[in-house]
Amino acid sequence: MDSSDLYRDITDFAHTTPHWVQKVVEVWTEYGLLVFGLLYISVWWRARGKQGGDPRALALAVLAPLVTALVYVASEVVKSTIDEERPCRAVAGAAASLIPCPPYGDWSFPSNHSAIAGAAAVALALAVPRLAWLTLPMGLLMAFSRVFVGVHYPHDVGMGLLLGASLAVLAVAALTGPMIRLTTAVQGSGNRLAVWFTGPGPAHRP
Protein backbone atom coordinates (compact mmCIF):
# COMPACT_ATOMS: atom_id res chain seq x y z
CA MET A 1 0.00 0.00 0.00
CA ASP A 2 1.22 3.48 -0.82
CA SER A 3 -0.79 6.48 0.30
CA SER A 4 2.15 8.90 0.22
CA ASP A 5 0.39 11.39 -2.07
CA LEU A 6 -2.62 11.61 0.22
CA TYR A 7 -0.28 11.89 3.20
CA ARG A 8 1.43 14.88 1.55
CA ASP A 9 -1.93 16.50 0.81
CA ILE A 10 -3.12 16.15 4.41
CA THR A 11 0.13 17.32 6.01
CA ASP A 12 0.32 20.25 3.60
CA PHE A 13 -3.26 21.14 4.59
CA ALA A 14 -2.30 20.85 8.27
CA HIS A 15 0.35 23.53 7.83
CA THR A 16 -2.19 25.93 6.29
CA THR A 17 -4.54 25.75 9.29
CA PRO A 18 -4.41 28.33 12.09
CA HIS A 19 -1.92 27.70 14.86
CA TRP A 20 -4.67 27.10 17.42
CA VAL A 21 -6.20 24.38 15.22
CA GLN A 22 -2.85 22.63 15.02
CA LYS A 23 -2.49 22.79 18.81
CA VAL A 24 -6.00 21.42 19.39
CA VAL A 25 -5.30 18.48 17.08
CA GLU A 26 -1.94 17.88 18.74
CA VAL A 27 -3.58 17.71 22.16
CA TRP A 28 -6.32 15.43 20.83
CA THR A 29 -3.91 13.03 19.14
CA GLU A 30 -1.83 12.76 22.32
CA TYR A 31 -4.56 12.63 24.97
CA GLY A 32 -7.84 11.92 23.18
CA LEU A 33 -7.76 8.25 24.13
CA LEU A 34 -8.19 9.35 27.75
CA VAL A 35 -11.71 10.51 26.85
CA PHE A 36 -12.55 6.92 25.94
CA GLY A 37 -11.22 5.95 29.37
CA LEU A 38 -13.63 8.36 31.03
CA LEU A 39 -16.46 6.91 28.97
CA TYR A 40 -15.53 3.38 30.08
CA ILE A 41 -15.85 4.46 33.70
CA SER A 42 -19.13 6.28 33.09
CA VAL A 43 -20.71 3.34 31.24
CA TRP A 44 -19.54 0.86 33.89
CA TRP A 45 -20.83 3.02 36.75
CA ARG A 46 -24.18 3.40 35.05
CA ALA A 47 -24.45 -0.35 34.42
CA ARG A 48 -23.49 -1.44 37.95
CA GLY A 49 -26.04 0.90 39.50
CA LYS A 50 -28.85 0.33 37.02
CA GLN A 51 -32.20 -0.04 38.74
CA GLY A 52 -33.27 -3.68 38.81
CA GLY A 53 -29.95 -4.89 37.48
CA ASP A 54 -29.09 -5.76 33.89
CA PRO A 55 -26.49 -8.54 33.55
CA ARG A 56 -26.00 -7.92 29.84
CA ALA A 57 -25.46 -4.17 30.28
CA LEU A 58 -22.90 -4.83 33.00
CA ALA A 59 -21.14 -7.49 30.93
CA LEU A 60 -20.86 -5.15 27.94
CA ALA A 61 -19.59 -2.32 30.15
CA VAL A 62 -16.87 -4.53 31.63
CA LEU A 63 -15.96 -5.95 28.23
CA ALA A 64 -15.44 -2.57 26.55
CA PRO A 65 -11.98 -1.83 28.05
CA LEU A 66 -10.98 -5.51 28.02
CA VAL A 67 -11.76 -5.84 24.32
CA THR A 68 -9.84 -2.64 23.61
CA ALA A 69 -6.82 -4.07 25.44
CA LEU A 70 -7.03 -7.24 23.33
CA VAL A 71 -7.14 -5.13 20.17
CA TYR A 72 -4.05 -3.21 21.28
CA VAL A 73 -2.16 -6.49 21.71
CA ALA A 74 -3.31 -7.67 18.28
CA SER A 75 -2.25 -4.37 16.73
CA GLU A 76 1.18 -4.64 18.33
CA VAL A 77 1.58 -8.19 16.96
CA VAL A 78 0.79 -6.99 13.44
CA LYS A 79 3.04 -3.94 13.84
CA SER A 80 5.96 -6.13 14.92
CA THR A 81 5.67 -8.24 11.75
CA ILE A 82 5.42 -5.34 9.27
CA ASP A 83 8.41 -3.03 9.58
CA GLU A 84 6.95 0.01 7.83
CA GLU A 85 8.93 3.18 8.42
CA ARG A 86 7.10 6.26 9.63
CA PRO A 87 6.10 8.66 6.84
CA CYS A 88 7.66 11.58 8.71
CA ARG A 89 11.02 9.99 7.82
CA ALA A 90 10.20 8.09 4.65
CA VAL A 91 8.13 10.43 2.45
CA ALA A 92 10.31 12.75 0.40
CA GLY A 93 9.09 16.30 0.02
CA ALA A 94 6.44 16.04 2.72
CA ALA A 95 5.81 18.84 5.19
CA ALA A 96 7.42 18.44 8.59
CA SER A 97 5.34 16.58 11.16
CA LEU A 98 3.65 18.77 13.76
CA ILE A 99 4.84 16.52 16.60
CA PRO A 100 8.19 14.73 16.92
CA CYS A 101 8.54 11.74 14.64
CA PRO A 102 8.51 8.50 16.70
CA PRO A 103 11.91 6.83 17.03
CA TYR A 104 13.20 4.27 14.56
CA GLY A 105 11.77 0.85 15.40
CA ASP A 106 8.38 2.26 16.41
CA TRP A 107 6.82 1.13 13.16
CA SER A 108 3.96 2.77 11.37
CA PHE A 109 1.54 0.01 10.27
CA PRO A 110 -1.08 -0.26 11.63
CA SER A 111 -1.78 2.79 13.77
CA ASN A 112 -2.18 1.66 17.38
CA HIS A 113 -4.06 4.85 18.23
CA SER A 114 -6.54 4.18 15.44
CA ALA A 115 -6.96 0.51 16.36
CA ILE A 116 -7.61 1.42 20.00
CA ALA A 117 -9.99 4.22 19.00
CA GLY A 118 -11.87 1.94 16.60
CA ALA A 119 -12.24 -0.78 19.22
CA ALA A 120 -13.25 1.64 21.96
CA ALA A 121 -15.77 3.43 19.76
CA VAL A 122 -17.48 0.20 18.71
CA ALA A 123 -17.34 -1.50 22.13
CA LEU A 124 -18.85 1.54 23.84
CA ALA A 125 -21.52 1.84 21.15
CA LEU A 126 -22.44 -1.81 21.66
CA ALA A 127 -22.67 -1.23 25.41
CA VAL A 128 -24.77 1.94 25.09
CA PRO A 129 -26.07 2.31 21.52
CA ARG A 130 -26.97 5.98 21.87
CA LEU A 131 -23.29 6.74 22.51
CA ALA A 132 -22.49 5.80 18.89
CA TRP A 133 -23.12 9.39 17.76
CA LEU A 134 -20.25 10.44 20.03
CA THR A 135 -17.79 7.52 20.01
CA LEU A 136 -17.74 6.80 16.27
CA PRO A 137 -16.85 10.39 15.27
CA MET A 138 -14.26 10.40 18.07
CA GLY A 139 -12.65 7.29 16.58
CA LEU A 140 -12.58 8.81 13.10
CA LEU A 141 -11.16 12.07 14.45
CA MET A 142 -8.40 10.20 16.29
CA ALA A 143 -7.46 8.36 13.11
CA PHE A 144 -7.43 11.55 11.03
CA SER A 145 -5.37 13.37 13.64
CA ARG A 146 -2.56 10.82 13.34
CA VAL A 147 -2.15 11.71 9.67
CA PHE A 148 -2.75 15.42 10.28
CA VAL A 149 0.17 15.64 12.72
CA GLY A 150 2.33 13.65 10.30
CA VAL A 151 3.13 10.41 12.12
CA HIS A 152 1.04 7.93 10.08
CA TYR A 153 0.07 7.21 6.51
CA PRO A 154 -3.66 7.25 5.68
CA HIS A 155 -3.58 3.49 5.07
CA ASP A 156 -2.10 2.98 8.57
CA VAL A 157 -5.06 4.63 10.24
CA GLY A 158 -7.63 3.10 7.89
CA MET A 159 -6.42 -0.40 8.62
CA GLY A 160 -6.10 0.43 12.30
CA LEU A 161 -9.74 1.48 12.47
CA LEU A 162 -10.84 -1.61 10.53
CA LEU A 163 -8.79 -3.93 12.72
CA GLY A 164 -10.02 -2.36 15.94
CA ALA A 165 -13.69 -2.21 14.98
CA SER A 166 -13.90 -5.71 13.49
CA LEU A 167 -12.05 -7.40 16.34
CA ALA A 168 -14.19 -5.52 18.86
CA VAL A 169 -17.40 -6.80 17.26
CA LEU A 170 -16.11 -10.38 17.16
CA ALA A 171 -14.75 -10.29 20.71
CA VAL A 172 -17.91 -8.80 22.19
CA ALA A 173 -20.04 -11.37 20.37
CA ALA A 174 -17.87 -14.22 21.65
CA LEU A 175 -17.37 -13.01 25.22
CA THR A 176 -20.69 -11.48 26.23
CA GLY A 177 -22.21 -14.81 27.34
CA PRO A 178 -19.22 -15.88 29.45
CA MET A 179 -18.96 -12.38 30.95
CA ILE A 180 -22.64 -12.41 31.95
CA ARG A 181 -22.10 -15.72 33.73
CA LEU A 182 -18.95 -14.43 35.41
CA THR A 183 -20.46 -11.18 36.67
CA THR A 184 -23.57 -13.01 37.87
CA ALA A 185 -21.38 -15.42 39.83
CA VAL A 186 -19.43 -12.52 41.32
CA GLN A 187 -22.64 -10.80 42.38
CA GLY A 188 -23.67 -13.95 44.21
CA SER A 189 -20.28 -14.51 45.83
CA GLY A 190 -20.85 -12.28 48.84
CA ASN A 191 -17.38 -10.74 48.53
CA ARG A 192 -17.87 -7.06 49.31
CA LEU A 193 -15.20 -5.72 46.95
CA ALA A 194 -16.36 -7.91 44.08
CA VAL A 195 -20.00 -7.03 44.63
CA TRP A 196 -19.12 -3.33 44.82
CA PHE A 197 -17.41 -3.63 41.42
CA THR A 198 -20.31 -5.40 39.72
CA GLY A 199 -23.19 -3.99 41.72
CA PRO A 200 -25.40 -6.21 43.87
CA GLY A 201 -27.55 -7.49 41.01
CA PRO A 202 -31.33 -7.85 40.97
CA ALA A 203 -31.41 -10.74 43.46
CA HIS A 204 -29.72 -8.66 46.17
CA ARG A 205 -31.57 -5.38 45.75
CA PRO A 206 -34.15 -4.36 48.33
Image (cartoon, helix red, strand yellow):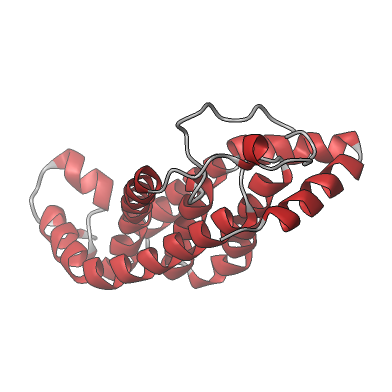
192 over 123 or under it: above or below = above
Q: Nearer the viewer, residue 152 or 104?
A: 104
Q: Nearer the viewer, residue 93 or 120?
A: 93
103 over 34 or under it: above or below = above
Residue 94 image point, x, y percent = 77, 41
Q: Nearer the viewer, residue 26 or 86?
A: 86
Q: Quadrant of the N terminus?
A: bottom right
- Tell me the residue at 35%/47% (across/down): 81
Q: Is residue 17 left or right of residue 118?
A: right
- Tell me the residue at 23%/71% (across/down): 174
Q: Is residue 198 left or right of residue 80?
A: left
View extreme (left): residue: 189
- For the question of whether residue 17 can be seen, the reply is no
Q: Is residue 196 left or right of residue 46?
A: left
Residue 20 image point, x, y percent = 86, 35
Q: Nearer the viewer, residue 131 or 201?
A: 131
Residue 102 image point, x, y percent = 56, 30
Q: Quadrant of the C terminus?
A: bottom left
- Tell me the residue at 32%/47% (across/down): 77
Residue 166 image point, x, y percent = 41, 69
- For the question of whether residue 172 can be seen, the reply is yes
Number of marks: 0
Q: Is residue 27 left or right of residue 22?
A: left
Quarter location, residue 183: bottom left
